[in-house]
Amino acid sequence: MAEVPSARLNKEEVRYRQHEKCMTCNYFYYPNSCEKVEGNVSQEAVCTKWEMQKKKEPMDGSSYMDEFKKANPQ
Ligand code: SF4
């Protein structure tokens, strides 16, 4: 069995966190669009602009298509 190093950092020192992902970000639009960052983004990724998700109004069909076209330029 591998030995655990003795001088490890505590979680506060390293800002240990679990829920900062694009999918929990205020700027994320399912399935892969972002208000802040251009191009497709991954639900599992994160960037320095992450912000806790607030409740959003549901997008109507045309808003969804606008977001989809922005994320998937032809
Ligand atoms: S702002 Fe950053 S963390 Fe938030 S959805 Fe866009 S790329 Fe992801």
Image (cartoon, rainbow, N blue to C red):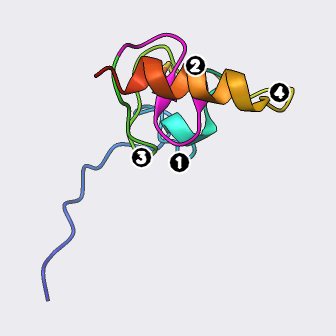
Q: Which residue is mark 3?
A: 44
Q: Which residue is mark 4?
A: 56
Q: Farthest residue to the left: give it.
A: 2
State the residue in front, 63 or 28: 63
Q: What element does badge 2 sit on? A: helix
**Distance between the Cα atoms at labels 2 and 1?**
31 Å
Whether 56 is among the magenta residues is no
Badge 3 amino acid:
Glu
User: Do tag 3 and tag 2 residues touch (Cβ < 8 Å)?
Assistant: no
Q: Residue at x 49, y 10 (%)?
A: 36
59 vs 34, left or right, is right
Respond yes or no on whether mark 2 lies under 8 Å from ligand 1: no
Instruction: Count neighbours of disc 4 (C-alpha within 10 A) and say few if under 14, some if 14 to 19, many if 20 or more.
Output: few
Asked where in the image residue 5 lies, by quadrant, the reply is: bottom left
Q: Which residue is mark 2?
A: 66
Q: What element does badge 4 sit on? A: loop
Q: What element does badge 1 sit on? A: loop
Instruction: Count neighbours of disc 2 (C-alpha within 10 A) and say few if under 14, some if 14 to 19, many if 20 or more.
Output: few
Disc nearer the start of the sequence (4/3)? 3
Disc nearer the start of the sequence (4/2)? 4
Residue 31 screen position, x and y as percent: 52, 42
**Distance between the Cα atoms at labels 3 and 1?**
11 Å
Q: Which residue is mark 1?
A: 18
**Distance between the Cα atoms at labels 4 and 3?**
20 Å
Disc nearer the start of the sequence (4/1)? 1
Q: Residue at x 29, y 49 (%)?
A: 8
State the residue in front, 48 or 28: 28
Viewer-side label of 2, 1: 2
Q: Which residues are magenta?
A: 28-38
Magenta residues: mostly which secondary structure? loop
